[in-house]
Amino acid sequence: MPPLDSDLIAKAQKGDFSAFEQLVFRYDRQVLTIAARFVQSSDDAKDIYQEVFIRVYQGLRKFKMQSEFATWLYRITTNVCLTHGTRRKRHAHVSLDDDYDENEGDPHPSRVVASGAPAPDQQTIDEEISIHVRNAIESLSPQQKLVFTLKHYQGLKLREIAESMQCSEGTVKKHLFTATQRMRKQLKDVFE
C-alpha cells in the first residue's frame, strides 16, 4: 500500500528528499495539466510547474496539515498561474507556432493525443474544435479561466476550488457562471 500524503509530508519536513520526490511524482501530472490548460506555451507550462514545486519545497516545513495537501498544492498552483498571467501580459508576445515546443518539436502538453487516434477526418474536426475551445478559454479573465480549468479539466468540487483560490464558493460560482456563459456565446456557431 502506498504511503499516505501525511506520512510523506512528515518525512519530507524532517529532510527526507525521497519523500518529497514521491509527493512530486504523485501530483506532478495534475499540476502540469492545470498549467498547460492555463497557458498557451509548453515552456510557460513548464515554468509554472517548476515554480509551483519550488514554492512547495520552500513552504513544506511550515505546512501544518490543517488542510489537505492537495488543496494546499492547488492553492499554490492557482497563485502561480494567476501571477504568471499577470507577468505575461506585461511581456506579451505571439508565438508563430503555438502547437509545438520550440526546442524539441514536441506537441503542447494540452494537445497530446493518445495512441489509437481517430481517423484523419475526425482528427481534423477534433483539432478545429479544440482550437475554437482553446481560443474561447483564452478570452476569459485569469480567474474565470482558472475556475473553468479546475472544474472541467481537473474535476475539482466548487468547495475545493474556493479553498485553493482562497475565496468564497459564491465567488467561484460567479466566475464559473460567467465563464460558461462567455464560452457558450463564443462557441455557439461552432456547435450549431
Image (cartoon, rainbow, N blue to C red):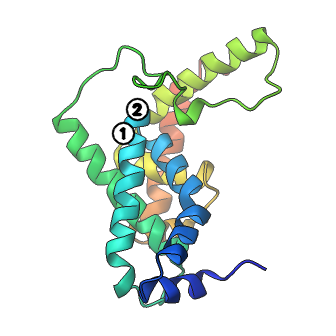
| Amino acid at pointer 2 | Ser
* Viewer-side residue, 112 vs 125: 112
Task: Examine the rendered structure and indicate whether residue 86 appears above or below residue 51.
Answer: above
Residue 41's label in the rendered image is: 2
Number of numbered markers: 2
Q: Are the residues flagged by discs 1 and 2 in contact, CB closer than 8 Å? A: yes
Residue at image point 45% right, 47% down: 35
Q: Which residue is mark 1?
A: 44
Residue 146: x %, y % from top left: 44, 51
Give residue 155's quadrant in the image.
bottom right
Residue at image point 42% right, 16% down: 97
Residue 27: x %, y % from top left: 57, 63
| Amino acid at pointer 1 | Asp
At numbered mark 2, what does the secondary structure look like: helix, strand or loop?
loop
The quadrant the N terminus occupies is bottom right
Dot 2 alpha-carbon crowd within 10 angstroms: few under 14, some 14 to 19, many 20 or more: many
* Viewer-side residue, 167 vs 39: 39
Residue 170: x %, y % from top left: 46, 67
Residue at image point 34% right, 86% down: 62
Dot 1 alpha-carbon crowd within 10 angstroms: few under 14, some 14 to 19, many 20 or more: some
